Image (cartoon, rainbow, N blue to C red):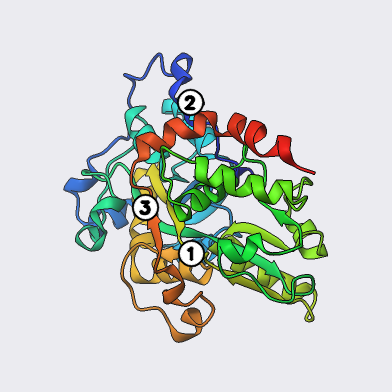
Amino acid sequence: MKKRNLSLVLAAVIAMGSISGCSGQTSAKEVDLNSMTKDEILAEARKEGRVDSVGMPDTWANWVGTWNDLKTEYNLDHTDTDMSSAEEISLFESEKKNATKDIGDVGQAFGPIAEEKGVTLKYKTSYWDSIPDWAKDDDGDWIIGYYGTMTMMTNKKIVKEAPKSFEDLLKGDYKVAVGDVAAANQAQFAVLAAAIAMGGDESNVEPGLEYFRKIAEQGRLDMGEFSMARIEKGEVGVAFLWDYNALGYRDQFLKNNPDADFEIHVPAEGSIQSGYCTILNKYSQRPHAAAMAREYILSDQGQINLAKGYARPVRDVELPQEVKEKMLPDEQYANSRMIQDQSAWDETTKKIGGMWQEEVISYAK
């Protein structure tokens, strides 16, 4: 899925100067959404009749639940084109007044970049006061809707005792899949999770690299394609995945094979969390429909929809018992944290691929 390959693109987005030469243009339909009431926005959204998204596919974090609700509640039709965060921002910027898309979902680091590139439309939503300060821009250029935590997904058919910590993992004799650290956002965060657990941070991932070098020296680092199919087939014992991916995969595996047995744990020593935020296209031809989509995403039901897809809602909403039961226990997240130094992490991601190749892959047996 292209949406998940978000790494090593921060520099590419920043360098998109050739696309932004006419950034002074504005859409004929650009509006001040923050000056409008919810009812006024809804009335206009109904006239627009649809909202088209990028990077918000049905199968990711149960977006389909929200799209279905928007059709039922507001009669808004919808289509999505899946793409990476960098591609979303580039599309908004290149199409400008000829915009075909209205809203996107980008990695946490990309919200400020989209704002800097001048492609965002401000809208705070009626839930503004219940959204944590760390999860929103001051004017609503971007708002985080959900977040995930790095976990270890274990195939119990291969690994009798599922590791619950990095220390446990180091003692195993099975293959460990991290993914392509040079190209995959998820894999980079796996390294950061290990670094944090071992005393490092966003500017110092050496402890994480050293940890995985030990796995490589043991001959246990999986060098094959990091894919759902290989995990399901049992070609690896443990895979590093965002919790919502791991839980969703587990459900799918059980549907395909009732005898499948997978266990998921947040590493006990510590782990990293990261969110995704909505950006409304400044040049959207349907700005009110885009605003209503964000409004619904931040609503109680919208947050519950995301939780049904195993994402952790950004607002403190009461989840139905059946949804709670499918999530990992809250106590597993005790030592997890969000990015604390985004600028340092941005710099690290520019070089982490080369560091991984030199300090980990070169030691693989």
**Relative vertical location of residue 26 with respect to residue 212 in this rendering, above or below:** above
Label 1 neighbourhood size at 10 Å, few (<14), some (14-19), many (20+)? many
Q: Position of residue 97 (x, y in %)?
A: 41, 27
Residue at image coords 59%, 61%: 245
Query: Label 3: how many residues lie within 10 Å, few (<14), some (14-19) or many (20+)?
Result: many
Nearest the viewer among 320 and 71 is 320
Tell me how far mark 3 sits from mark 1, CA to CA: 12 Å
The numbered dot on residue 144 is 3
Q: Going by the image, does 245 lie left or right of 72?
A: right
Looking at the rendered structure, which numbered label has been put on residue 11? 2
Real-space Cα separation, disc 2 to disc 1, in angstroms = 27 Å
Mark 3 and mark 1 lie on one chain; the one further toward the N terminus is: 3
The spot of residue 150 in percent (x, y) is 52, 58
x 62%, y 57%: residue: 240
Q: Quadrant of the C terminus?
A: top right
Q: In the image, residue 133 lies at what x, y percent?
A: 23, 53
Of badges 2 and 3, nearer the viewer stands 2
Q: Are marks 2 and 1 in contact (CB under 8 Å)?
A: no
